[in-house]
Image (cartoon, rainbow, N blue to C red):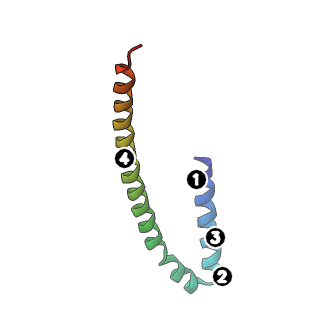
Amino acid sequence: VGKFVQLISTFLGGFLIAFTKGWLLSLIMLSGIPPVVLDGVILAWVISKISSHGQKAYHEVSTIVGQTVGSIRM
């Protein structure tokens, strides 16, 4: 939580300074934020799907290994 607050305050402070120095360039830079956020959302969604697929595969393999080890008799 502390790192998040630090990053947000740095971001807002940077834009405040940018708006005081050159407001037109700051507005142009501000227009680039939505595509970056959209890319982050898409990336998080893809990583979530890949992770879910990996967890399913891991579960199937662990079931097979458990059955195999359980069926070994000494």
Q: How far is disc 4 from disc 1 in space, using C-alphas? A: 26 Å
Residue 9: x %, y % from top left: 61, 60
Task: State yes or no: discs 2 and 3 in contact (Cβ < 8 Å).
Answer: no
Q: Could you say whether the residue bearing mark 2 is in a helix, strand or loop? A: helix
Q: Which image quarter: residue 70? A: top left
Query: Please, which residue is most extreme toward the top here?
Result: 74
User: Mark 3: which amino acid?
Assistant: Gly
38 to 54, vertically: above or below: below
User: Mark 1: which amino acid?
Assistant: Phe
- Looking at the image, residue 53 sits to the left or right of residue 34; the answer is left
Judge by depth and name the residue closer to the eye, 38 or 64: 64
* Residue indicated by mark 4: 52
> Badge 1 local density, few (<14 within 10 Å), some, or many (20+)?
few
Label whose residue precedes the other's in the sequence (1 or 3): 1
* Residue indicated by mark 1: 4
Q: How far is disc 2 from disc 3 in space, using C-alphas? A: 11 Å
Q: How far is disc 2 from disc 1 in space, using C-alphas? A: 26 Å
* Residue indicated by mark 2: 21
Judge by depth and name the residue closer to the eye, 7 or 17: 7
Query: Please, which residue is most extreme toward the bottom here?
Result: 24
Task: State yes or no: discs 4 and 1 in contact (Cβ < 8 Å).
Answer: no
* Residue at position x 51%, y 76% in the image: 30
Q: How far is disc 4 from disc 3 in space, using C-alphas? A: 37 Å
Label whose residue precedes the other's in the sequence (4 or 1): 1
* Residue at position x 34%, y 20% in the image: 71
* Residue at position x 60%, y 78% in the image: 19
Q: Could you say whether the residue bearing mark 4 is in a helix, strand or loop? A: helix
Judge by depth and name the residue closer to the eye, 5 or 65: 65
